[in-house]
Amino acid sequence: MKSGRIFLNCIMLITERDIGEKYSNLYAISKLTVSTSNVLNRFKKLNDGKPWKEQIKPFNFFLVGFQAIEENEKAVKPLAPFTKDYQKIVYEPFIDYEKGEVKEGSQYFKPLSRTILQYIEHLENKFDGDIGVLKRKYIQADGLVYIGKEANNIEDQPLDVTGAQGFINEEETINFILTLIPEKARKIGIKHRSELKYLKEKARERKLNFNTTNMQKILKYYSSQGLNTEAK
């Protein structure tokens, strides 16, 4: 019999109580970068009155806590200036991403133990089966939507983890504008022919600005009719 070391594979069962005891005093916090104007604007109150070198600037790091509660049917999303001691922000004032208001309290932060347990209990929707090596689900595409530079808007919603992100279906919107007649345009809220003519010109050139008042009216009407304006 050859000499050698014998290694035993031991399986250690970790209970919910074990996770609670180890992580209950820690909170789920992530580091992100100020990569959009929306995020930077949330820090206006903290930046007011501070010298430039102490302000939160574009591409600085900041910390975000996973939301734990809702107020007025809105999830409170804590934002805080970056610090190496992540857990410190739980006990200091922070900015609510949704409203830009200053709030304080550990109840707004999600305990790390709860995050771990939810990960364990999370159902695997991409595979078939429960035990062993699972097989990927068979997916059949029932449609195809092309998106262009509007995909850059993904970063405008980095903290909205409760809802699906939507993208304007530019091709269908252009076709809708090009076939829009003055009578229907007036019902939508575009009263002057010159405005409709301008929109049609921009649609032909594929240079539509979806943030203008008239474009917002069109998108709102388009959506209210149950038409497909978005790809999710």
Image (cartoon, rainbow, N blue to C red):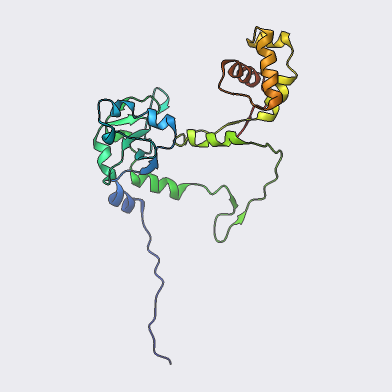
Q: In this view, which residue lies farthest toward the bottom?
A: 1
* Occupied quadrant, residue 202: top right
As drawn, 11 above or below 120: below
For the question of whether residue 227 can be seen, the reply is: no
Task: From the top left corner, tell me how far across and down residue 192 is, in percent.
Answer: 66, 7
Q: Is residue 102 left or right of residue 166?
A: left
Q: Choose between 16 and 203: the one closer to the eye.
A: 203
Q: Position of residue 93 (x, y in %)?
A: 26, 31
As drawn, 192 above or below 165 = above
Q: Inspect this view and state whether residue 198 appears.
A: yes
The foreground one among 2 and 225 is 225
Q: Is 164 in front, or is 132? A: 164
Q: Which residue sits at x=25%, y=29%?
A: 50
Question: In the rendered view, would you say 214 is above or below 13?
Answer: above
Residue drawn at 53 percent across, 34 percent down: 153
Q: Identify the image quadrant of residue 209.
A: top right
Q: Which image quarter holds the C terminus?
A: top right
From the top left corner, tell me how far across and down residue 197 is, in percent: 70, 14
Q: Is residue 227 left or right of residue 65?
A: right
Q: Position of residue 44 (x, y in %)?
A: 33, 26
